[in-house]
Image (tube, rainbow, N blue to C red):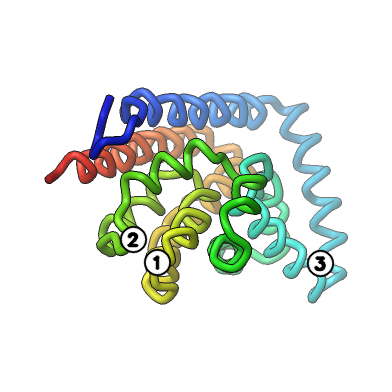
Amino acid sequence: MLENGCLVPAPLASATRRAMLLLCVALLAAALAYSDALHGLLFELFSQAEAIIRNRPVLGPIVFVLLAAASAMLAFVSSAAFVPVAILAWGQAASVLLLWLGWTLGGVLSYGISLLLGRQVVYAIASRPLLERYEGLLSHRPPFGLVLLLQLALPSEVPGYLLGLLRYPFGKYLAALLIAEFPYAVATVYLGSTFLERRTVPFLLLALFLAAASVWAFAALHRRFRTP
Protein backbone atom coordinates (compact mmCIF):
# COMPACT_ATOMS: atom_id res chain seq x y z
CA MET A 1 0.00 0.00 0.00
CA LEU A 2 1.29 3.46 -0.86
CA GLU A 3 0.94 6.36 1.54
CA ASN A 4 2.47 9.76 0.76
CA GLY A 5 4.58 8.09 -1.91
CA CYS A 6 6.11 5.51 0.49
CA LEU A 7 5.43 1.82 0.72
CA VAL A 8 4.13 0.79 4.14
CA PRO A 9 2.57 -2.43 5.42
CA ALA A 10 -1.16 -2.75 6.00
CA PRO A 11 -1.55 -1.03 9.37
CA LEU A 12 -4.07 -3.41 10.90
CA ALA A 13 -2.11 -6.50 9.87
CA SER A 14 1.09 -5.24 11.49
CA ALA A 15 -0.67 -3.99 14.61
CA THR A 16 -2.62 -7.22 14.93
CA ARG A 17 0.59 -9.26 14.91
CA ARG A 18 1.95 -7.18 17.81
CA ALA A 19 -1.35 -7.48 19.68
CA MET A 20 -1.47 -11.24 19.20
CA LEU A 21 2.09 -11.56 20.50
CA LEU A 22 1.12 -9.59 23.61
CA LEU A 23 -1.91 -11.81 24.16
CA CYS A 24 0.14 -14.99 23.72
CA VAL A 25 2.64 -13.78 26.32
CA ALA A 26 -0.26 -12.82 28.63
CA LEU A 27 -1.84 -16.26 28.27
CA LEU A 28 1.47 -17.92 29.08
CA ALA A 29 1.88 -15.71 32.16
CA ALA A 30 -1.69 -16.46 33.23
CA ALA A 31 -1.01 -20.18 32.91
CA LEU A 32 2.08 -19.77 35.10
CA ALA A 33 0.03 -17.84 37.67
CA TYR A 34 -2.68 -20.53 37.66
CA SER A 35 -0.20 -23.34 38.39
CA ASP A 36 0.54 -23.64 42.11
CA ALA A 37 3.95 -25.20 41.51
CA LEU A 38 5.15 -22.87 38.78
CA HIS A 39 3.85 -19.71 40.40
CA GLY A 40 5.37 -20.77 43.71
CA LEU A 41 8.74 -21.34 42.05
CA LEU A 42 8.65 -17.96 40.30
CA PHE A 43 7.51 -16.19 43.45
CA GLU A 44 10.42 -17.72 45.34
CA LEU A 45 12.86 -16.52 42.67
CA PHE A 46 11.33 -13.04 42.74
CA SER A 47 11.54 -13.00 46.55
CA GLN A 48 15.21 -13.98 46.50
CA ALA A 49 15.97 -11.24 43.98
CA GLU A 50 13.94 -8.77 46.06
CA ALA A 51 16.01 -9.59 49.15
CA ILE A 52 19.19 -8.90 47.22
CA ILE A 53 18.15 -5.51 45.87
CA ARG A 54 16.51 -4.47 49.15
CA ASN A 55 19.96 -4.73 50.74
CA ARG A 56 21.26 -2.36 48.07
CA PRO A 57 19.03 0.70 48.46
CA VAL A 58 21.03 2.81 46.00
CA LEU A 59 22.38 0.29 43.51
CA GLY A 60 19.10 -1.65 43.20
CA PRO A 61 16.97 1.22 41.86
CA ILE A 62 19.82 2.37 39.60
CA VAL A 63 20.15 -1.08 38.02
CA PHE A 64 16.37 -1.31 37.55
CA VAL A 65 16.22 2.11 35.88
CA LEU A 66 19.12 1.19 33.58
CA LEU A 67 17.43 -2.10 32.60
CA ALA A 68 14.23 -0.20 31.84
CA ALA A 69 16.23 2.30 29.76
CA ALA A 70 17.86 -0.54 27.81
CA SER A 71 14.43 -2.07 27.13
CA ALA A 72 13.31 1.27 25.63
CA MET A 73 16.37 1.37 23.34
CA LEU A 74 16.80 -2.24 22.22
CA ALA A 75 14.09 -4.47 20.77
CA PHE A 76 15.50 -7.66 22.30
CA VAL A 77 15.62 -6.35 25.90
CA SER A 78 12.54 -6.40 28.14
CA SER A 79 12.11 -5.04 31.65
CA ALA A 80 8.85 -6.93 32.24
CA ALA A 81 10.52 -9.83 34.07
CA PHE A 82 12.03 -7.44 36.62
CA VAL A 83 8.79 -5.59 37.41
CA PRO A 84 7.48 -8.15 39.95
CA VAL A 85 10.81 -7.94 41.79
CA ALA A 86 10.51 -4.14 41.89
CA ILE A 87 6.95 -4.37 43.23
CA LEU A 88 8.04 -6.68 46.04
CA ALA A 89 11.00 -4.45 46.90
CA TRP A 90 9.57 -0.95 46.59
CA GLY A 91 5.80 -1.20 46.12
CA GLN A 92 3.62 -0.28 43.17
CA ALA A 93 3.90 3.52 43.24
CA ALA A 94 7.70 3.57 43.41
CA SER A 95 7.89 0.88 40.72
CA VAL A 96 5.76 2.97 38.38
CA LEU A 97 7.99 6.01 38.90
CA LEU A 98 11.23 4.04 38.45
CA LEU A 99 9.92 2.29 35.33
CA TRP A 100 8.70 5.61 33.90
CA LEU A 101 12.08 7.18 34.66
CA GLY A 102 13.92 4.30 33.00
CA TRP A 103 11.82 4.34 29.86
CA THR A 104 12.15 8.11 29.66
CA LEU A 105 15.92 7.84 30.04
CA GLY A 106 16.02 5.23 27.28
CA GLY A 107 14.02 7.47 24.97
CA VAL A 108 16.27 10.44 25.69
CA LEU A 109 19.41 8.37 25.09
CA SER A 110 18.07 6.95 21.81
CA TYR A 111 17.20 10.50 20.67
CA GLY A 112 20.69 11.71 21.66
CA ILE A 113 22.46 8.83 19.91
CA SER A 114 20.51 9.50 16.75
CA LEU A 115 21.04 13.26 16.91
CA LEU A 116 24.76 13.19 17.71
CA LEU A 117 26.07 10.00 16.10
CA GLY A 118 23.94 9.83 12.95
CA ARG A 119 22.03 7.26 10.99
CA GLN A 120 24.80 4.71 10.43
CA VAL A 121 25.10 4.13 14.18
CA VAL A 122 21.32 4.10 14.54
CA TYR A 123 20.92 1.56 11.72
CA ALA A 124 23.28 -0.77 13.60
CA ILE A 125 21.02 -0.60 16.67
CA ALA A 126 17.45 -0.35 15.38
CA SER A 127 15.51 -1.60 12.36
CA ARG A 128 16.69 0.33 9.31
CA PRO A 129 13.66 -0.53 7.11
CA LEU A 130 11.26 0.58 9.83
CA LEU A 131 13.11 3.84 10.46
CA GLU A 132 13.39 4.64 6.75
CA ARG A 133 9.70 3.87 6.22
CA TYR A 134 8.52 6.33 8.86
CA GLU A 135 11.17 8.92 8.09
CA GLY A 136 9.75 9.01 4.57
CA LEU A 137 6.25 9.53 5.91
CA LEU A 138 7.08 12.34 8.33
CA SER A 139 7.98 15.94 7.67
CA HIS A 140 10.93 17.42 9.56
CA ARG A 141 8.51 19.18 11.90
CA PRO A 142 5.58 16.79 12.47
CA PRO A 143 2.81 18.16 14.69
CA PHE A 144 2.90 17.28 18.38
CA GLY A 145 -0.24 15.14 18.17
CA LEU A 146 1.36 12.97 15.50
CA VAL A 147 4.54 12.59 17.57
CA LEU A 148 2.42 11.51 20.54
CA LEU A 149 0.72 8.90 18.34
CA LEU A 150 4.15 7.68 17.22
CA GLN A 151 5.09 7.15 20.87
CA LEU A 152 1.86 5.26 21.56
CA ALA A 153 1.77 3.17 18.39
CA LEU A 154 5.33 2.17 17.52
CA PRO A 155 7.72 -0.15 19.38
CA SER A 156 9.38 1.85 22.15
CA GLU A 157 12.85 1.72 20.59
CA VAL A 158 11.75 3.41 17.34
CA PRO A 159 10.44 6.97 18.06
CA GLY A 160 13.57 8.31 19.80
CA TYR A 161 15.91 7.23 17.01
CA LEU A 162 13.43 8.40 14.36
CA LEU A 163 12.84 11.85 15.83
CA GLY A 164 16.54 12.36 16.47
CA LEU A 165 17.21 11.73 12.78
CA LEU A 166 14.52 14.29 11.95
CA ARG A 167 16.06 16.83 14.38
CA TYR A 168 12.67 17.19 16.03
CA PRO A 169 12.74 19.75 18.91
CA PHE A 170 13.88 17.95 22.04
CA GLY A 171 11.47 19.70 24.42
CA LYS A 172 8.43 18.60 22.43
CA TYR A 173 9.82 15.09 22.05
CA LEU A 174 10.40 14.83 25.81
CA ALA A 175 6.85 16.01 26.54
CA ALA A 176 5.37 13.40 24.17
CA LEU A 177 7.65 10.74 25.65
CA LEU A 178 6.60 11.51 29.24
CA ILE A 179 2.89 11.59 28.37
CA ALA A 180 2.95 8.37 26.36
CA GLU A 181 5.11 6.27 28.67
CA PHE A 182 3.32 7.01 31.95
CA PRO A 183 0.11 5.03 31.29
CA TYR A 184 2.19 2.12 29.96
CA ALA A 185 4.26 2.18 33.16
CA VAL A 186 1.10 2.14 35.29
CA ALA A 187 -0.37 -0.73 33.24
CA THR A 188 2.86 -2.75 33.33
CA VAL A 189 3.16 -2.47 37.10
CA TYR A 190 -0.50 -3.36 37.54
CA LEU A 191 0.03 -6.43 35.34
CA GLY A 192 2.97 -7.41 37.51
CA SER A 193 0.90 -6.94 40.65
CA THR A 194 -2.01 -9.07 39.39
CA PHE A 195 0.47 -11.77 38.38
CA LEU A 196 2.01 -11.84 41.85
CA GLU A 197 -1.45 -11.97 43.43
CA ARG A 198 -2.63 -14.63 40.94
CA ARG A 199 -5.60 -12.52 39.84
CA THR A 200 -5.75 -13.99 36.36
CA VAL A 201 -9.03 -12.40 35.25
CA PRO A 202 -7.92 -8.75 35.79
CA PHE A 203 -4.53 -9.71 34.35
CA LEU A 204 -6.03 -11.05 31.11
CA LEU A 205 -8.58 -8.23 30.83
CA LEU A 206 -5.84 -5.60 31.07
CA ALA A 207 -3.69 -7.49 28.57
CA LEU A 208 -6.66 -7.60 26.18
CA PHE A 209 -7.24 -3.88 26.66
CA LEU A 210 -3.58 -3.09 25.95
CA ALA A 211 -3.64 -5.24 22.83
CA ALA A 212 -6.77 -3.44 21.57
CA ALA A 213 -5.22 -0.06 22.42
CA SER A 214 -2.12 -0.99 20.45
CA VAL A 215 -4.22 -1.83 17.38
CA TRP A 216 -6.19 1.41 17.75
CA ALA A 217 -3.08 3.57 18.12
CA PHE A 218 -1.37 2.00 15.11
CA ALA A 219 -4.47 2.34 12.94
CA ALA A 220 -4.99 5.95 14.11
CA LEU A 221 -1.38 6.75 13.23
CA HIS A 222 -1.77 5.50 9.69
CA ARG A 223 -5.09 7.29 9.28
CA ARG A 224 -3.18 10.48 10.06
CA PHE A 225 -0.70 9.65 7.31
CA ARG A 226 -3.54 9.18 4.84
CA THR A 227 -5.09 12.51 5.75
CA PRO A 228 -4.10 15.15 3.14
Q: Which residue is mark 1?
A: 168
Residue type at mark 2: give it.
His
What residue is rendered at 25% in x and 62% in y?
Answer: 143
Q: Position of residue 193 (x, y in %)?
A: 58, 49
Residue 217 sits in quarter: top left
Residue type at mark 1: give it.
Tyr
The vertical placement of 154 against 179, above or below, is above
Distance from Cα at disc 2 to Cα at disc 3: 46 Å
The disc label shown at residue 140, or none: 2
What residue is rendered at 65% in x and 57% in y?
Answer: 68
Q: Position of residue 37 (x, y in %)?
A: 77, 27
Q: Position of residue 64 (x, y in %)?
A: 72, 61
The disc label shown at residue 54, or none: 3
Q: Position of residue 57 (x, y in %)?
A: 80, 74
What residue is rendered at 67% in x and 40% in y?
Answer: 76
Q: Looking at the image, tell me whether mark 1 or mark 2 is earlier in sequence order.
A: 2
Instruction: Name the foreground residue: 197 vs 188.
Output: 188
Instruction: Name the foreground residue: 5 vs 67.
Output: 5
Q: Nearer the viewer, mark 2 or mark 3?
A: 2
Residue 103 sits in quarter: bottom right
Task: Provide the secondary structure element on which disc 3 rests.
Answer: helix
Lateral position of residue 216 relative to residue 108, left or right = left
The vertical placement of 99 against 153, above or below, is below
Task: Provide the secondary structure element on which disc 1 rests.
Answer: loop
